[in-house]
Image (cartoon, coloured by chain):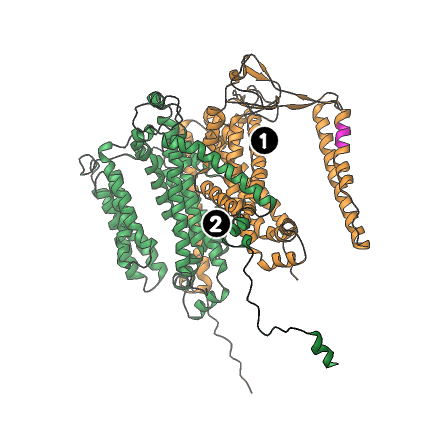
């Protein structure tokens, strides 16, 4: 039998064949194109449709962008210069750039103050944004609100100085008393600060704003993109501590405190921001003592802060709920009391988990600051829809202005969300 | 022999209200409650003092007074002689209309964009990323204004349609896009059963509901048969018949005709008018929220493990069916909760109607009625109550649905 086998097998390969190269249609440029762009009938159709969409957008946008006129004084002049050729009238931006950025009432001689406040904001934000910088730099951040207030509103330096002294007094009292109990330190600090502010309020003369170093600018003169930035930054930074308090309150074992927080959060989240702004513009005045006037800017800040605090509270509640139960139990078993456990164990972890959510809320809030144009504040959108588009010479310049506004918001919001993704990667301490 | 010692019976001392953790929470709650009551009382007393100074008192009587303003986009009968309450009702229906339209279109747009963003097609997925990023990072108010500008400043005026060689033409001779709104043909029942046209439309809706249940019963029967015999009966033509035969019969009996808009003088007459403000709000909310929904859909799909796709592919399913039968049903569980909050956002953002003059409840009750009557507190409270009710209702309904699709764990 074995003989027959030996005779029928004429050839036995004893080495392995080298792998043959992949078909030409699967590799290189052709392969990539087939895999990614012309993958089947549907893929091809989609690709062609997308190509057409891109072509249509570029074909109308590029000439508009590159033929644009930047130096005329009115839309009519723009049309003369363009003479029927398709092109944008960007001169509205160059002529009205100050109105778009600072509003139409902010004194032109004081623009440098707003610019300086913006630059200082970036400096002050750095130690918060990049946590590898030396912690000492946080002092700049702590001082920033007072400096910015003085720079933007001007007037006497005594007001922000007094506010600062009040906070410093509160801080020292807290340091002294909190060794025995957190509650004692907290309430002591509040009382000390209020004491300083009340006494200081008597000492500052009424006419202090009259001949101050920086000219006093009332809040109703603020406007443009500066107003959006100010509302966004102020409300987000105020609402984070408030949101933490609300979130902790909602998690609390104490039913009354819990229900106060739940009702507040659900109420605010259930109504649109516009109704809260209506409250600020027409209703809040009723709740202040008769004959007192509270600035519209402050009323709007109060309402937007409450609004975003409710959303941030929900984000942080998610972070708190995501922490394993063991963390709470470990803190308890170490003998930490509630404030210590929260400050040292729970919140650092919960806040870290909540960062993407908080950034989402912050970006959403920054976009929502455009809503103040509805209650006739002249922010960027309010400026465009109000003074600029109704001006004789620029009536009808829509796309340049709206495009500029979109671009400003896009740059800021996209930048913030990219930062948050970077921070998330930096803070990821779990297994990768 | 064991001796039991009772723990020492501590008697309650006042200092324990602060020092003993068992009682301290009562102290805190008492302080919180006291602070709340005191501050509410303070605000209320301020409010009543301020109202007294202005000679006003809280009263809802203004809702019964004639409104005196017109609303050009309305779902129910209304004229300026009717009361503020009627105007509010028109506003409520307009809010619900735009919210419903925007929710449906945003969902369709978001699902398509979310799925396409994960497509193998490089160009398409990049284009969808650009769409999502561009729309998510620009305020919705700006988008509303942009689309409103297109509707009012770019569209031709009705007089552009006039003359022998008009500058603009109607689409298919049926639709007219003008800067005063979009005119579309209106269906008219020439011979409605039970007298009124409203009853006729109700009958048609009932017929459609009947067809829905009929089609459902048919597919259940086909499923049962498939389980029993392994062969699925061909049902698509029966389904088509169930949907369309009753509808066509009803429409023929009631004499459906179309009222096509036509140019009369300087404006279009006949047909349905959809105002530019409604379209601006609807499209802007749909496109803006669609970008967010696309992100939710993408996250939901990516949450389904790759093994599911591979398992389905190894069963021989085609890519389209893998998506429809295997991935999307599972991804829905992840997608639905954020989708609920997007619907809530649409409803709340529809209040931006006031920026383009669409008369939703914010425009009627919170806008003109408030300004005319000066009843700020009553109007804003009523407005908040409405939105709060809608928000709670939507989340309740969607939570029921969410519970019905979520994993039944044992």
Q: Determine whether B124 is above or below A128 in the image.
A: above
In the foreground, B95 or A88: A88
Magenta residue span: B246-250
At which x and y percent is residue A74? 32, 23
User: Overall secondary structure of the magenta stretch?
Assistant: helix
SS for tag 1? helix
| Left or right: B178, with A171 as reference point | right
* Chain A rendering hue: green
Residue located 48% across and 25% down the image:
B368
> Quick check: do tags 1 and 2 share a chain?
no
Q: Determine whether A220 is above or below A270 in the image.
A: above
| Left or right: A284, with A120 as reference point | right
The numbered mark at residue B93 is: 1
Q: Quadrant of the N terminus of chain A?
A: bottom right
Chain that is orange in the image: B
Q: Quadrant of residue A386?
A: top left
Q: Determine whether B370 is above or below B336 in the image.
A: above
Q: Which residue is mark 2?
A: A260
Name the subunit of mark 2: A
Name the subunit of mark 1: B
At which x and y percent is residue A351? 42, 57
């Amino acid at each position: 039998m074995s003989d027959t086998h030996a005779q029928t097998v004429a050839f036995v390969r004893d080495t392995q064949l080298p792998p043959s190269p992949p078909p030409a249609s699967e590799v290189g440029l052709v392969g990539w194109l087939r895999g990614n762009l012309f993958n089947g009938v549907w893929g091809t159709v989609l690709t062609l449709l997308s190509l057409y969409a891109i072509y249509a957008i570029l074909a109308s946008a590029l000439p508009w962008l590159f033929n644009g006129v930047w130096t005329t004084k009115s839309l009519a002049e723009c049309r003369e210069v363009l003479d029927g050729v398709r092109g944008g009238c960007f001169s509205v931006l160059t002529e009205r750039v100050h109105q778009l950025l600072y509003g139409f009432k902010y004194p032109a001689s004081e623009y440098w103050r707003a610019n300086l406040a913006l630059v200082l904001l970036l400096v002050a934000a750095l130690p918060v944004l990049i946590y590898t910088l030396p912690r000492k730099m946080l002092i700049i951040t702590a001082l920033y609100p007072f400096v910015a207030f003085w720079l933007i509103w001007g007037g006497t330096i005594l007001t922000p100085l007094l506010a600062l002294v009040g906070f410093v007094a509160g801080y020292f009292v807290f340091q002294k008393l909190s060794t025995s109990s957190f509650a004692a330190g907290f309430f002591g600090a509040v009382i000390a600060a209020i004491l300083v502010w009340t006494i200081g309020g008597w000492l500052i003369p009424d006419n202090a704003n009259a001949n101050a170093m920086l000219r006093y600018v009332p809040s109703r003169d603020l406007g443009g993109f500066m107003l959006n930035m100010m509302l966004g930054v102020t409300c987000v930074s105020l609402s984070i501590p408030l949101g933490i308090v609300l979130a902790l309150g909602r998690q609390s074992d104490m039913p009354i405190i819990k229900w106060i927080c739940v009702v507040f959060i659900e109420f605010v989240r259930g109504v649109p921001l516009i109704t809260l702004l209506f409250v600020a513009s027409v209703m809040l005045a009723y709740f202040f003592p008769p004959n007192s006037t509270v600035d519209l800017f402050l009323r709007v800040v109060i309402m937007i802060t409450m609004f975003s605090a409710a959303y941030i509270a929900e984000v942080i509640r998610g972070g708190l709920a995501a922490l394993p139960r063991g963390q709470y139990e470990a803190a308890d078993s170490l003998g930490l009391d509630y404030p210590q456990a929260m400050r040292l164990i729970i919140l650092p972890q919960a806040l870290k988990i909540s960062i993407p959510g908080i950034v989402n809320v912050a970006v959403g809030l920054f976009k929502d600051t455009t809503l103040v144009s509805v209650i006739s504040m002249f922010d960027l959108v309010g400026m465009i829809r109000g003074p600029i588009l109704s001006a004789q010479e620029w009536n009808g310049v829509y796309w340049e202005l709206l495009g500029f506004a979109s671009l400003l918001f896009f740059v800021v919001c996209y930048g913030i969300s990219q930062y948050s993704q970077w921070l998330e990667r930096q803070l990821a301490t779990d297994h990768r | 022999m064991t001796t039991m010692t009772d723990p020492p019976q501590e008697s309650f001392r006042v200092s324990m209200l602060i020092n003993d953790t068992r009682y301290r929470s009562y102290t805190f709650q008492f302080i919180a409650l006291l602070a709340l009551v005191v501050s509410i009382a303070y605000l209320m007393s301020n409010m009543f003092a301020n109202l007294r100074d202005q000679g006003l008192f809280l009263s809802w009587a203004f809702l019964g007074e004639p409104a005196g303003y017109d609303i050009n986009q309305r779902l129910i009968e209304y004229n300026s002689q009717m009361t503020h309450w009627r105007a509010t009702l028109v506003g409520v229906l307009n809010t619900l209309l735009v919210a419903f339209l925007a929710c449906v279109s945003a969902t369709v747009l978001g699902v398509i964009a979310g799925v396409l963003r994960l497509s193998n097609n490089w160009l398409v997925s990049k284009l969808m990323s650009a769409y999502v990023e561009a729309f998510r990072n620009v305020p919705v108010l700006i988008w509303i204004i942009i689309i409103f500008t297109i509707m009012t400043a770019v569209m031709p005026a009705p007089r552009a349609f006039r003359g022998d060689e008009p500058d603009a033409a109607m689409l298919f001779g049926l639709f007219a896009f003008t800067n005063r709104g979009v005119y579309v043909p209106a269906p008219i029942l020439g011979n409605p059963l039970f007298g009124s046209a409203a009853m006729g439309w109700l009958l048609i809706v009932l017929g459609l509901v009947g067809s829905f249940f009929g089609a459902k019963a048919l597919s259940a029967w086909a499923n049962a048969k498939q389980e029993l015999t392994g062969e699925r009966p061909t049902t698509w033509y029966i389904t088509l018949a169930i949907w369309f035969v009753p509808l066509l019969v009803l429409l023929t009996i009631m004499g459906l005709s179309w009222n096509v808009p036509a140019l009369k003088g300087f404006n279009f007459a006949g047909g349905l008018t959809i105002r530019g403000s409604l379209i601006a709000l609807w499209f802007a909310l749909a496109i803006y929220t669609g970008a967010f929904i696309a992100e939710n859909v993408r996250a939901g799909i990516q949450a389904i493990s790759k093994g599911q796709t591979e398992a389905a592919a190894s069963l021989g399913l085609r890519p389209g069916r893998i998506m429809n039968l295997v991935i999307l049903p599972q991804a829905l569980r992840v997608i639905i909760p954020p989708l609920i909050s997007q619907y809530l956002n649409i409803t709340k953002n529809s209040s931006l109607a006031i920026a383009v003059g669409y008369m939703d409840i914010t425009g009627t009750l919170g806008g003109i009625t408030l300004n005319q009557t000066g009843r700020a507190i009553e109007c804003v409270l009523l407005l908040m109550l409405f939105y709060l009710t809608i928000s709670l209702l939507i989340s309740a309904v969607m939570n029921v649905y969410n519970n019905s699709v979520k994993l039944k764990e044992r």
